[in-house]
Image (cartoon, rainbow, N blue to C red):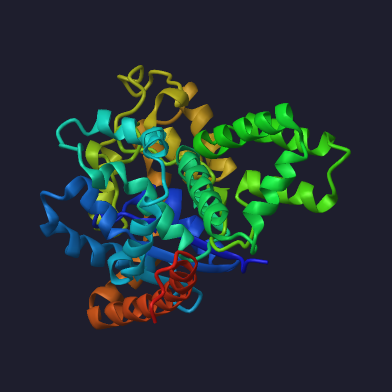
Amino acid sequence: MAIERIVSGMRPTGNLHLGHYNGVLKNWVSLQHEAESLFFVADWHALTTHYDDPGIIEKNVWDMVVDWLAAGIDPALATIFIQSKVPEHAELHTLLSMITPLGWLERVPTYKDQQEKLTSKDLSTYGFLGYPLLQSADILIYKATQVPVGEDQVPHIEFTREVARRFNHLYGKEVGYEEKAEDAIKKLGSKKGQLYRELKTVYQEEGDDQALEAAQALIEEQQNLSLGDKERLLGFLEGGGKMILVEPEYKLTPASKMIGLDGQKMSKSYNNTISLREEPKEVEKKIRTMPTDPARIRRNDPGDPDNCPVWKLHEVYSSEKTKDWVKIGCKEAGIGCVECKQPVIESVLKELKPMQERASNYTESPDLVKSVVAEGCEKARKLARDTMREVREVMGIDFS
């Protein structure tokens, strides 16, 4: 049975903001107590869209690591490392590219979505097309059992599972496995044998779950097959045999309620963020100047919290008592917008204070940050080397 291991990464975008903290880092801080955890800086992934401006990557890497540590990622509990410092990622990516159908890459939903969103970038590159496979290599090389993701990333994990299944099917068979499976197919008879082959092809090439279920039902219905033959056909269908690469499960991250200062999703692209290391005076200024319900032009105009971005921050930061005070005060014009914003300011500053104190300690000791990452890279590389020894051996390229 595979060791419970969590793997997740983040592209280096520089200083992180409250959206990152509430959407990802809080979850990581919790997960590091539940299982062996590896968190990596995905600097190669940054090059898929910023290949023409690599100068910002190094600074962004170290800024982001400091924010991880400040947020509570504990090097004693989790392994923190940089993707490019573990070259085995690239090796596994290359080897997996030999067996991955092109159509699998083209049907990953975010491939077309990102092309449509990043119209100013020339994304007609192999690096961009192949980044889901690099993402799969990032996960599979550590034999991760769980990957924390949002709903939009679930297709990436399903893709990774398909790649692992195909790899295990090609390289994880028992001696004489394929011949024994072929013999079992013949026992199905001509028509059912042909149907099995067709369903197997559809499932393995297109990932069609209905084809998988139909083939499994076909096998279970056969009275003339031994238990051994049924197991071989089920394994042959799903890429059974020795499990070299673990098929990870996705672990859905609770949806973040964090919105930006303008009511949209918090994002640097929208210039609506509060960074984790924002100066307190700047935090207060940003929240005080947030837009509110347009209906509240004057102090005595009643409003509706659902039409106000500030209310969304109350939902994240305020107690039930404070939220009741806000709802009644807004709808009855009992409080003004300035009063409404004050509890949010206090709560945000309270949350940021311990993080900013820890960040200050790390920024004053850059060698400490680098030593944490160096140690993490070595731990990660040891695991990666172990996996690659197995991979090279079964692929026939272990010449040691």
Quarter of the rendering containing residue 262? top left
Quarter of the rendering containing residue 351? bottom left
Q: Is residue 323 left or right of residue 19?
A: right
Residue found at x 60% / y 50%? 239
Quarter of the rendering containing residue 201? top right
Give 231 or 354, whichever is nearer the viewer. 231
**Is any atom of residue 67 visible in this view?**
no
- Give the quarter of the figure containing the N terminus: bottom right
Please tell me how many numbered marks the rendered image carries.
Answer: 0
Residue found at x 36% / y 17%? 295
Residue 73, percent from left and from top? 44, 68
Give 382 or 341, whichever is nearer the viewer. 382
334, above or below 79, in the image? above
Q: Is residue 199 left or right of residue 92?
A: right
Residue found at x 26% / y 57%? 44
Give 129 or 238, whichever is nearer the viewer. 238
Residue found at x 64% / y 64%? 175
Residue 6, percent from left and from top? 53, 62
- Give the quarter of the figure containing the C terminus: bottom left
**Given the current orientation, which residue lies at the most extreme right position?**
223
Q: Is residue 244 left or right of residue 214?
A: left
Residue 308, percent from left and from top? 39, 27
